[in-house]
Amino acid sequence: MKIGEMVKVSVQNRSAVLSTNMYPNEPKTYVYEGEIVKGPSWLGNDFVCIKTGKLDALDREDVKFVNLKNVISVNDSDFSFENEPAKSEDKIVMVTGSKGDQYTVTLKDDGTASCTCAGYGWRGKCKHIEQAKEK
Ligand SMILES: [Zn+2]
């Protein structure tokens, strides 16, 4: 789903499926149709904003903030929200220096590396990184 796209989403009404729900007549799902618009910056990536074109009680154009985790279908196709694939973890390697000190080398998946030793701090490189890569 991208900004500007026209969509029809079915959203599960979380509270209606709870047995403790006090409003038994609430629909189990809501359907929103409209254009995806850019949401406010504080809105998380797991939300989309849909401008339904209808007016709310205050005559403002109605924009629904939809939690993607509650979306069950988009344009009549099943939908299930999956988080962005987790960023691969940096590889942390403990290296023992020539004087017996322990250093922590971080090998990142972009090929860069860092070390906690003073030499790395000065020069931006050190032998521990080479040792860590060999491990
Ligand atoms: Zn080092």
Image (tube, rainbow, N blue to C red):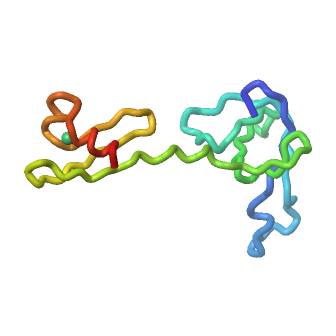
Q: Position of residue 86 (x, y in %)?
A: 55, 47
Decide which of 12, 61 is in the foreground and name it. 12
In the image: residue 25, left or right of residue 67: right
Q: Position of residue 56 (x, y in %)?
A: 79, 38
Displayed-image quarter of ligand 1 = top left
In the image: residue 39, left or right of residue 56: left
Residue 120 visible somewhere in the drawing: yes
Decide which of 30, 130 is in the foreground and name it. 130
Decide which of 128, 47 is in the foreground and name it. 128
* Residue in the image at 89% along x and 45% along y: 77
Farthest residue, direction front:
134
Q: Position of residue 8 (x, y in %)?
A: 87, 39
How many numbered dots are placed on residues in this image? 0
Q: Position of residue 59 (x, y in %)?
A: 78, 32
Picture quarter with the N terminus? top right
* Residue in the image at 27% along x and 40% along y: 129
Farthest residue, direction left:
99
In the image: residue 88, left or right of residue 18: left
* Residue in the image at 76% along x and 51% along y: 80
* Residue in the image at 84% along x and 29% along y: 6
Residue 53 visible somewhere in the drawing: no
Give residue 61's quadrant in the image. Answer: top right
